[in-house]
Amino acid sequence: GYLVETSEIVETLQKYHKIKQAVVIPKRGKNLNIYLCAYYISNQEISIQELKAHLKRYLTDYMIPDEYVRVDRFPETLNHKIDKTELLRG
């Protein structure tokens, strides 16, 4: 396996002019494989191809998320941090 720094992916996503905020979470698929899912906040529609093209300019292929989910806001914990567990519940 590869060592993936999700913070680096988040930073690269947030450099994209259409994205206000992002978070990347490893998820377990139906066949138990692990893949990356990027959640992001944007006022505009962004195609997956557009996002992947941006990321590929800065990151290696194994750091490119497989899934992208646009949300209006991120759920928060009581400590005002992004509630990743709640995001995964969808």
Image (spheres, rainbow, N blue to C red):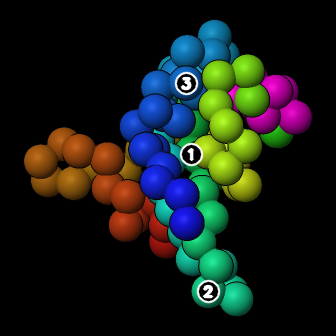
Who is closer to the viewer here, 28 or 83? 28
Furthest-top residue in view? 17
* Residue at 75 percent of width and 29 percent of height: 56
Residue neighbourhood size for the residue with mark 2, other residues' Cα within 10 Å, grouped as few (<14), some (14–19), many (≥20): few
Q: Distance from label 1 to label 3 (Cα)?
A: 13 Å
Q: Is residue 84 above or below residue 41?
A: below
Residue neighbourhood size for the residue with mark 1, other residues' Cα within 10 Å, grouped as few (<14), some (14–19), many (≥20): many
Q: Distance from label 2 to label 1 (Cα)?
A: 21 Å
Whichever of callouts 1 and 3 sits on the residue coming sooner in the sequence is: 3
Residue 58 seen in render: yes
Task: Place residue 35 in its image quadrant.
Answer: bottom right
Left or right relative to 56: residue 41: left
Q: Amino acid at mark 1?
A: Tyr
Residue 39's mark? 1
Element type where label 3 sits in the image: helix
Q: Quadrant of the N terminus?
A: bottom right
Who is closer to the viewer here, 70 or 49? 49
* Residue at 71 percent of width and 54 percent of height: 67
Q: Is residue 45 above or below residue 70?
A: above
Residue 46 seen in render: no
Who is closer to the viewer here, 66 or 63? 63
* Residue at 19 percent of width and 42 percent of height: 80
Element type where label 1 sits in the image: strand
Furthest-left residue in view? 79
Residue neighbourhood size for the residue with mark 3, other residues' Cα within 10 Å, grouped as few (<14), some (14–19), many (≥20): some
Q: Which residues are magenta?
A: 49-55
Left or right relative to 11: residue 52: right
For label 3, the residue is 12
Q: Is residue 52 magenta?
A: yes
For label 2, the residue is 32
Number of marks drawn? 3
Whichever of callouts 2 and 1 sits on the residue coming sooner in the sequence is: 2
